[in-house]
Amino acid sequence: MLPAGHHLLLLALALVPLDSLVGAAAAGAGEGFCSAEPSSDCSQGPPLYWKVTNPTLAPVHLQDLPGFTRSVYKKDHALITPESHVFSPLPDWTNTLGAYLISPALGAHFTMYLANMQDGSKSALPPKDVERLIFVLQGSIALSLESERAHSLSVDSYAYLPANMKHSMTSDEPSTLVIFERRYTAIGDYHPDLVVGSTDKQPLLETPGEVFELRKLLPTSLHYDFNIHIMDFQPGEYLNVKEVHYNQHGLLLLEGQGIYRLGDSWYPVQAGDTIWMAPFVPQWYAALGKTKSRYLLYKDVNRNPLI
């Protein structure tokens, strides 16, 4: 247990923007970072969520620090950062590399992984009775269904596929997806439907006592046993509630940077970082830096914890 003074020191260090940590390395790599005050070079702005696949503190910046990683694994949480991603061919997919970020091996009841598709890539089906949600981070894909018209999904679009629904995804350009899968927990006669949408089409929801903006990608009815939240924080905003609850979380920071408290640990985080939160781990977030933070959050819902 650290003395109180050490906690304050950790917080002070965490307030240093991650951009400043890469300094000369970023300049040497030739990356043009767009700051809060856009220059002429950034007049058009970078693509949405570009920092997920091109993080400020990228693996290339750590090549001269052998053995260094920001990733952490503990019994009730994990921080998985881009320099720790291990990609390999996804089973039964065509021309697609994947990196599993969260799985039951951690203690989770779901999987969360990245899928890097290329020209000519094609997906495989999840296992029997497993539902799937895909969210496009880069590029675009075509989603084909047996009984529906095909859907074109671009960045910030998503699709929820109920368990055992036949489908396939193809791509004719480099595309990155984040995918959530879990074994569906059925109750009564409730059966979920296909959902296809985009974040910007979802309404802002009330967040009593909080300042962040919240959107939910799936209906809140009993048909669905999890949801995906999109949460936006302006610089300096933070969670008022220091949460402790039975739900599990899988989080991907899409934009911005900040500090996340998990248990008794405090972690500076940036776009591209993934977090797993076990049930009842204390959790709290504050957005730092010059631009807003946005993260995507998996949460199990609508089921009795005894089931």
Image: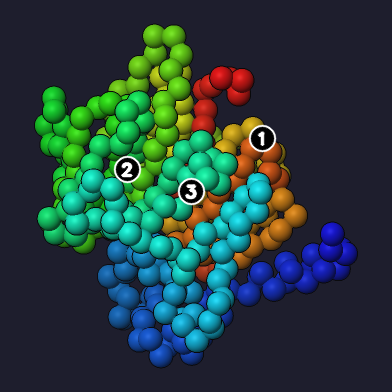
How far, Cα to Cα, is label 2 from label 3?
15 Å
Left of 227 or right of it: where is 88? left
- Write the residue at 64% across / 38% down: 279
- Write the residue at 25% across / 37% down: 125
Q: Amino acid at mark 3?
A: Ile
Residue 95 is situated, as x and y percent measured from the top left of the image, at 19, 56
Q: Is residue 291 above or below residue 283?
A: below
Q: Are the two marked residues, 2 and 3, in contact with CB atoms closer than 8 angstroms?
A: no
Q: Quadrant of residue 269?
A: bottom right
As drawn, the residue found furthest toward the top would be 189
How far, Cα to Cα, is label 2 from label 1?
26 Å
How far, Cα to Cα, is label 1 from label 3?
19 Å
Left of 100 or right of it: where is 164? left
Mark 1: secondary structure? loop
Residue 72 is situated, as x and y percent measured from the top left of the image, at 60, 61
- Write the residue at 38% across / 86% down: 29
Question: Mark 2 or mark 3: which is in front?
Answer: 3
Mark 1 or mark 3, which has the lower sequence index? 3
Mark 2 or mark 3, which has the lower sequence index? 3
Q: Amino acid at mark 2?
A: Ile
Instruction: Rate crowding at label 1 as few (under 14), some (14 to 19) or many (20 or more) other CA atoms within 10 Å.
Output: few
Numbered label attached to residue 102 = 3
Q: Which residue is mark 1?
A: 245
Quadrant of image for the C terminus? top right
Instruction: Rate crowding at label 2 as few (under 14), some (14 to 19) or many (20 or more) other CA atoms within 10 Å.
Output: many
Numbered label attached to residue 23 = none
Mark 2 or mark 1, which has the lower sequence index? 2
Foreground pick, 144 / 88: 88
Q: Are the two marked residues, 1 and 3, in contact with CB atoms closer than 8 angstroms?
A: no
Q: Is residue 25 above or below residue 198?
A: below
Q: Which residue is mark 2?
A: 134
